[in-house]
């Protein structure tokens, strides 16, 4: 996968929907990974330094200490074993470290966007005739498979298969990040398995190896070059540009939210669809995003709260408010699909439910 180029001034700039600017210094060891994962936001024009990423930590000789885990001041936090530092100046942040920094960036990026009235959430997102459909769900539920099948239906376009942002005015802001293709995706993305490709594990082994990867992840965060090689050659999944996974598919960067369907697996034998209220969905989206972050991302949020750099109430209440406003008046549902069904079967059931709901809640006609 090709990386985004570096600007002439030594920085790579990313513009998150005109709300948050991220600047990554060229010499930062994590720069290559961030250029790949943020490629859809890359811009040739300098952006405000709402989040600045560099290698060298700032000195705070009077910082308080929590055993050998944390060093902190009211506006700085260093996670000592990982060699990562987060510095806050009002609504602006700096992230420093010589290791892998994406897992630090994700919760900071979410917080910066919340302050600009858009909250990050974990979901597959598509547009249908100019209106967004959000499918929040946990990992392994079938989001990536569902997206592929929806793209075969008339009127649909792609927004993202993992992360997105919901603005308080009801707009969904897409995130076309690279897709993680796993062995069970072979029937749905057959073109990605043709020819000479990195071998992937059998489906039966992908989950156990995934758990081992999670255990090893904290060690990899301190060694970005080794982590990059591990991602490249890992038999657990293949990282693919959305444009390669979904060739000829139209990408929609933003659209007003029309429908939200939270998806989960259950022990029953048939799918179940239940209408839910906004408060329920807000709580589920808050918790789902947090639990789907990498363990180190969760640790960053916990450490900011533990040191009063960002209180729990401020972190949760601000995001809850944005999500509640964005979902206000939007039809919301819980769709439960049988856990025993394969990704192929489950995604077919999700697509059928979405199409039925669009019959029940038709999108407004576009006025010429």
Image (tube, rainbow, N blue to C red):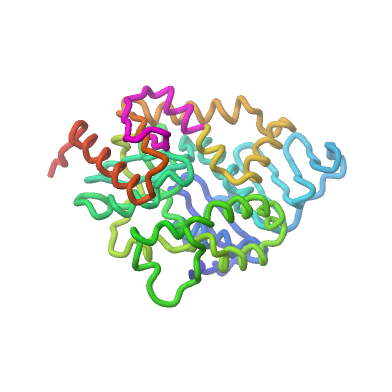
Looking at this rendering, what residue extends furthest in the left direction?
368
Task: Tell me the quadrant of the picture where the C terminus can be found.
Answer: top left
Between residue 243 and residue 229, name the one nearer to us. 229
Q: Position of residue 61 (x, y in %)?
A: 87, 44
Residue 101 in view (yes/no): yes
Q: Is residue 104 left or right of residue 134?
A: right
Task: Determine the image quadrant of residue 265.
Answer: top left
Q: Position of residue 356 (x, y in %)?
A: 21, 36
Q: Is residue 353 magenta?
A: no
Residue under the image location 67 percent in, 66 percent down: 226
Residue under the image location 66 percent in, 32 percent down: 310
Residue under the image location 34 percent in, 49 percent down: 146
Q: Is residue 309 above or below residue 173?
A: above
Tally of numbered discs = 0
Q: Position of residue 87 (x, y in %)?
A: 70, 44
Q: Position of residue 48 (x, y in %)?
A: 55, 50
Residue 178 in view (yes/no): no
Q: Which residues are magenta?
A: 261-286
Between residue 218 and residue 97, name the one nearer to us. 218
Task: Determine the image quadrant of residue 177.
Answer: bottom left
Q: Is residue 319 above or below residue 277?
A: below
Q: Is residue 282 magenta?
A: yes
Residue under the image location 47 percent in, 44 percent down: 19
């Amino acid at each position: 996968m090709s990386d985004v180029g570096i600007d002439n001034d030594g920085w790579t700039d990313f513009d998150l929907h005109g709300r948050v600017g991220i600047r990554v210094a060229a010499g930062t060891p994590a720069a290559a990974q961030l250029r790949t994962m943020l490629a859809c936001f890359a811009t040739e024009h300098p952006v405000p330094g709402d989040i600045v990423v560099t290698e060298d930590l700032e000195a705070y000789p009077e910082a308080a200490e929590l055993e050998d885990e944390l060093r902190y001041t009211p506006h700085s936090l260093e996670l000592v074993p990982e060699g990562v530092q987060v510095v806050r100046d009002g609504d602006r942040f700096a992230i420093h470290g010589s290791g892998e920094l994406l897992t630090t960036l994700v919760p900071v990026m979410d917080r910066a966007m919340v302050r600009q009235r858009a909250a990050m959430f974990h979901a597959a997102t598509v547009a249908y005739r100019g209106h967004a459909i959000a499918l929040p769900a946990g990992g392994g539920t079938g989001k990536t498979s569902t997206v592929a099948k929806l793209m075969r239906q008339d009127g649909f376009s792609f927004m993202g298969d993992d992360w997105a942002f919901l603005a308080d005015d009801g707009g969904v802001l897409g995130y076309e990040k690279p897709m993680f293709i796993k062995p069970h995706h072979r029937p749905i993305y057959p073109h990605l398995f043709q020819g000479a490709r990195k071998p992937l594990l059998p489906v039966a082994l992908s989950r156990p190896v995934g758990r081992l990867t999670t255990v090893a992840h904290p060690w990899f965060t301190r060694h970005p070059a080794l982590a990059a090689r591990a991602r490249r050659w890992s038999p657990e999944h293949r990282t693919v540009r959305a444009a390669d996974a979904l060739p000829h598919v139209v990408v929609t960067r933003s659209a007003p939210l029309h429908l939200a369907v939270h998806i989960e697996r259950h022990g029953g034998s048939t799918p179940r669809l239940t209408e839910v209220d906004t408060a329920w969905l807000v709580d589920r989206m808050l918790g789902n995003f947090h639990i789907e972050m990498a363990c180190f991302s969760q640790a960053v949020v916990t450490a900011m709260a533990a040191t009063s750099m960002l209180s729990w109430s401020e972190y949760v209440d601000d995001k809850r408010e944005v999500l509640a406003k964005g979902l206000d008046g939007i039809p919301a549902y819980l769709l439960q699909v049988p856990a025993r069904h394969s990704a192929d079967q489950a995604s077919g059931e999700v697509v059928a439910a979405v199409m039925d709901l669009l019959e029940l809640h038709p999108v407004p006609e576009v006025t010429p």
